[in-house]
Amino acid sequence: MVPLEPILVSVGLMFVIGLSCLMVKRDMVRILIGVEILFNAANLCFIALSTQVPGFVDPYAHSMVMMAIVLDGTVIAVGLAMVMNVYKHYKTIDIRKLRRLKW
Amino acid sequence: MVEVISQGINLPLPLLVLLIGGLTSLMVGLLSERIGVARLREVWMIIVSSATIISIYYLNQSVQKAGVIVISVWGQLPPFGGCFEIDTLSIFMSGSVAVLGFLVAIYSISYMEKESRLTEFYTLMTFMMAGMTGVVMAGDLFTLFVFWELMGLSSYVLVAFLKSRWGPIEAGFKYLVMSATAGAFLILSMSIIYGMTGTLNFAAIADSLRGAPTSPWIMALFSTLVVGFGVKSAIVPLHTWLPDAHPEAPSPISAMLSGIVIETGLYALARVLFLTFDPTMLKLPIAFLAVLTMTLANVMALLQSDIKRLLAYSSIAQVGYMLVGLAAGTAYGFMGLFLHVFNHSMMKGMAFLASGSIVHETGTRDINSLRGIGKMMPVTSISLFIALLGLGGVPGTNGFISKYHLFSAAFGSGLGWLGIMGVLNSALSMAYYIRIMQVLLGSPKEGFKANEAPILMLTVTMAMAVIIVILGIWPAPLISFASSASQSLVEGLSTYIGAVLG
């Protein structure tokens, strides 16, 4: 069995990194990278918890994470397509220029 | 009492119809461009959505006979593989999805006729319906997540569909980033559930987690679940994407998003929270969120001058009313919740479709410059009028019936202050509905001209107005259906668990 605590601590750290990346970054591509870090943290948590069954590693979590990776990839792809469209309109991918929609 | 289908590769019939319909809709679109037959895609979309309604009708008959139907996807028996678990509640929700989808499909024939890329539009709409049907029929979190993302992906693209303008793209990106973050929180909550129980099957989760003593992990699970499902269902601290995304989408899609997509999020929240926790534990936090959601959304809606944005804020307020039913936690409260889901899908769908007709004809969404539109577009205005009365909860419309049940459920379960807050908010919401009505009835400015909407759009809005009034005067059949749906969730919990675990 792999010790669980270090992995859970790193999952927490990755969540903090991802969320702060969403909050402070200006570049839209970097924001998408922040989303990807969040997804990877959650997937890592899944994999870490699947090793905690004594004797074997549960394949159910692995199939779940495989599917989740595919879904993350598609979400990020759609996001990148939107970034391209933003670039066409604004000639920049700075999120702070996109302030025309007010609350 | 339980029917288990586990041979070969299986999908529930409505889902199969929608997925195959979505895949073939691409080919049909290509064909209609090649051989030059106009409107083939639209006809195909209507065939698919009406076939979905028919297949839900047949599925309903077998569900009524069997109680709960368990369908395992790849021939593995649950709880080890993915499965669909269909009870009356799933039928109720998927029926709402299919009915609204059918009406919106008819409406978008004439609304979208000047746009290009219609093949993509109808394909994405079919897949969005497929995603929602899958979410409400899923029997484990894994299946739910896959269809959740299918619904999400289609709706991101549909929000940003009119990409020649800046608004939809900005709103779509905002929606995507917030929803994807929520998706990450959803996977985290799933991993916590997996770590605690070793499975993701709803029945097995309910069997082992319900009534577990409160621990930090349980609290972490609760908060990640609320964040994960709450962003899609626009609960207030997480709502900021909605007032941008819903108005910027094309109007039929606004009707779908406000009418049923956020309610699907609410369904998933209600189902998973109810299966994982004891309702007494949920009461206070959810009641707090409900009050926050409806108060803030109503106050914000008062300040809007854009008609579709106002309706979007009103959707958030309606989500707040629905949360009242979840906070009550009784079968009666859930009955109010799901009744309001269907009624809201009719009222808000219709309000968006009618205001979409107005926007389509006049080209502006500013309320003040629409003064006197009631004289130019009488039929659309009458149906919008009925929808607004229903949203405000005036007796004689179906909005009154479901709000009455929601608030009396709050009183019945010892949350009297929540019921009072709900009634006060409902009165406050009337203020901005009356503002729109005043604009509709006012006298037009000089030189302001608009034509009545095309006949197909009028038919759809009038049909929905008739449904609203009929269900307001004679609500008994819908109430008994919603009540059996909520009983299959609350009192049929042991059947639901027993269907998988035996």
Image (cartoon, rainbow, N blue to C red):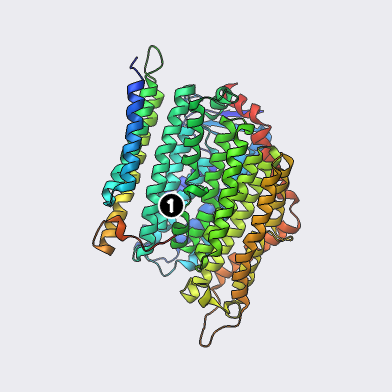
Residue in view at x 56 percent, y 59 percent: B299
Picture quadrant of residue A50: top left
Q: Residue furthest left?
A: A91
The kind of secondary structure element at disc 1 is helix
Question: Taking A71 as reference, is B57 left or right?
Answer: right
Position of the C terminus of chain B, as image quadrant, is top right
Residue in view at x 32 percent, y 28 percent: A10
Q: Position of residue B138 (x, y in %)?
A: 52, 36
Residue in view at x 24 percent, y 59 percent: A92
**Dot 1 alpha-carbon crowd within 10 angstroms: few under 14, some 14 to 19, many 20 or more:** many
Tell me if residue B89 comes above or below residue B293 in the rendering: above
Viewer-proximal residue among B233 and B449: B233
Residue in view at x 33 percent, y 66 percent: B164
Position of the N terminus of chain B, as image quadrant, is top right
Q: Position of residue B464 (x, y in %)?
A: 63, 62
Number of numbered discs overlaid on the protein picture: 1
Q: Residue furthest top?
A: A55
Task: Say which residue label 1 marks.
Answer: B155
Q: Position of residue B278 (x, y in %)?
A: 61, 30
- Tell me which amino acid carries mark 1: Ser
Picture quadrant of residue A13: top left
